[in-house]
Image: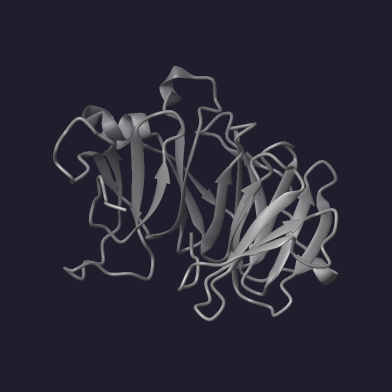
Amino acid sequence: MACIKGVSRSASVALAPDAPYMAAGTMAGAVDLSFSSSANLEIFKFDFQSEDRELPLIGECPSSERFNRLAWGKNGSGSDEFSLGLIAGGLVDGGIDLWNPLNLIRSEAKEQALVSHLSRHKGPVRGLEFNAIAPNLLASGADDGEICIWDLAAPAQPSHFPPLRGSGLATQGEISFLSWNSKVQHILASTSYNGTTVVWDLKKQKPVISFADSIRRRCSVLQWHPDVATQLVVASDEDDSPTLRLWDMRNIMSPVKEFVGHTKGNGA
């Protein structure tokens, strides 16, 4: 398959939910050809009318830290000021920065692009996702094993609910990824590098179910099935086990299906 458009970056990326834009944040743990130590957030436009294969850069600003994860959510505030939604960056120092992409694109408003800094976690933030059903909610998880749910209805004055932390069989170490259920607003799943996946009920503020990979693979990514509310897929970034496993929460004794084809571990 041929590449239609591209840009040369070592970056975490997120696509705009309702516009032809892509955000890219300088990736933690990687270097570019110039060995620069700087960190930036950039916005590129998908311009398929142009014959240029390089995506045009339409907005950028410096970041205080490099990125482990980037998320772009819909407008959860109801204000035209955030018509392009919010960009959230999970940083290496445990912080989360929120940007207004509209201000990033408007060069005259670039200095107002950084809306808020969220400080709660004690380790790098790798789990980060906006709720597609309730876009004012942002979930974050980090190396400290703690999950936070943030209410961004007022982006400049965010609030958070009591943090979630598993215990017993639901204990997680370094959280690697989070995913909101696509059908049920208050259901969230998290996976971790210790191989444990937990499904949370936010109404009850506790785990609904948890399961572990049979060989304790480093679980790096998970995603809910878009149509079947009880199914999710979990992947590992280990090169010696580059499969994706589909699980059904109605029976977690073994995966429903295993997908093969990758030759390297899955990080996204």
Please state the horizontal and vertical placement of residue 57, each as a whole percent of the image.
Answer: 21, 41
Q: Which residue is at the front of the view, 131 or 108?
A: 131
Q: Nearer the viewer, residue 94 or 177?
A: 177
Q: How is the image coloured?
A: one colour
Relative to 228, is 62 on the left or the right?
left
Q: Position of residue 45 (x, y in %)?
A: 27, 36
Residue nearer the viewer, 260 or 199: 260
Q: Is residue 67 left or right of residue 106?
A: right
Q: Residue at x 39, y 50 (%)?
A: 13
Q: Residue at x 37, y 60 (%)?
A: 66
Which corner quadrant of the image does residue 4 belong to? top left
Q: Is residue 28 above or below residue 222?
A: below
Residue 42, given in percent of the width and then of the height, sits at 29, 45
Q: Is residue 146 visible?
A: no
- The image shows residue 143, relative to residue 117, as above or below, that is below
- Name the quadrant containing residue 190: bottom right
Q: Residue at x 49, y 78 (%)?
A: 239
Q: Residue at x 82, y 55 (%)?
A: 207
